[in-house]
Amino acid sequence: MAKRVVVIGGGAAGLDAALNARRTSREVEVKVLNAEDKPAYSRCALPFVIGGDIEGFDHIIIYKSEFYKMMKIDLHLKTTVTEIDPSAKVVKALGPDGKEETFEYDSLILTTGARAVVPPIKGYDKKGVYPLRTISDASAILEEALKAKSAVVIGAGLVGLEAAEGLVKRGVKVTVIEALHQVLRPILDEDMAKLLQTKISAHGVKLMLNTKADEILGDDHVKAVAAGGEQVDADLVVMAIGVRANTDLAVKAGCKLGVTGGIKVDARMKTTVEDIYAAGDCVESVHLVTMQPVLCQLGTTAVKQGKVAGINAAGGYATFPGVLGSAVSKLFDVEVGFTGLTEWQARQAGMEVVVGSIPWKTRAEYYPGAKDIRVKLIFEKASMKLIGAQILGGEGVAPRVDALSLAIQKGMTAYELAKADTCYTPPLADTWSAITLAAEAALKKA
């Protein structure tokens, strides 16, 4: 009898788990149970559909249903799992028609993802107030944006700022309200955040930092948000405060959670319950610098963990080493990237650090179109090993972050980075690399 693999959740991690279970074994039966009405799509692309950069939501669906059939993956949409019985190895779910269905498994993979945090701000249930997590959310936001004059985004993380840009592109006047003292607190230090804030404000976005949204005002539909002692006009409110891991099913099945609130897994993505694996936004990961547990709810992490879970669930062998939280985005005319630890995170972890930061150009200064770039590198003082990096620039941020992520993983020091063999041609790069110069700046302080 063929091995039966059931995947709960049809997002990025679920799709990669299913595909890699199939690639590992042609004989294995693979079923994917997805509560949403669409197959896996890119959540990260939602703000860019809102802004019109991507033509429509159909364009962000990764594979159509026919692809799943071709790969012999049994996809069940609008199927909500209600119970897992690990002793009987049975999953119970409500199908599209509301009837209960049962699915037997030999290996189960939980890719239940995360849900948007909606804080209990007074008036949060008014019309025109939406989280931004699903195609359904984004579709409703876009519909409102096309007739709105003003909007408030609550939360200045990557999703909030990307949503703010999307709304500006639709001609909406946008205010971002953030309870913390800076934007992008998890990935930028204050000095880098200030540079980004100046750029965002220059595009007409009002940033209200160190400010809490007290109440959402209006009758049936939102009209304004009370925050910081003033009323901010808003025909639309986007809640972008963050996400929380969906762990209810895992807990009911007996899976232990880690200290971060995510599902506890080992390097093979196995939970504490026999034959149950987990991957993606719902699991706890290990940080490769601190070796401490963290939540790393990124698409890149989800697909890698899903791959490992799928291979192991189908009888293969694979491991997931951990995360650096490498992230990149484009906000208006500036790219922002990060990997490893910020300066404040490193200090919080009890590390003494040396920082090298340099403003430079993305191409030879005399070449037309050369853009500003700032590289900030964080080194552990005793060893001078690279432990974190942040970059703001007009272009070329992503490949630099990738290179620095690899440098952290390989334990490279400031001495090695300063001697790195880098490339040059006037249209693409200067004779001196900004990364090399930032490493040299750190060495002068060491």
Image (spheres, rainbow, N blue to C red):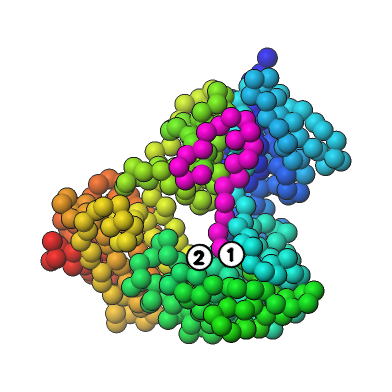
Judge whether residue 257 is colored magenta: yes
How many C-alpha atoms fall within 10 Å of the one at disc 2: few (<14), some, or many (≥20)? some
Q: In the rendered image of this protein, does residue 353 appear above or below residue 311?
A: below
**Residue at the spot x=50%, y=65% of the render?**
157
Please provide percent x and percent y for residue 196. Answer: 42, 75
Q: Quadrant of residue 159?
A: bottom right
Q: In the rendered image of this protein, does residue 70 appear above or below residue 149?
A: above
Name the one closer to the observer, 442 or 402: 442
Left or right, 17 with reference to 94:
left
Which label belongs to residue 157?
A: 2
Name the one closer to the observer, 1 or 244: 244
Q: In the rendered image of this protein, does residue 83 appear above or below residue 301?
A: above
Which label belongs to residue 201?
A: none
Look at the numbered discs 2 and 1 and tell me whether their residues touch, using CB distance below 8 Å.
yes
**Residue at the spot x=50%, y=52% of the render?**
298
Q: Amino acid at mark 1?
A: Ala
Q: Amino acid at mark 2?
A: Gly
Judge whether residue 332 is colored magenta: no
Q: Secondary structure at mark 1?
A: loop
**Residue at the spot x=50%, y=70% of the render?**
179
Q: In the rendered image of this protein, does residue 419 appear above or below residue 192?
A: above
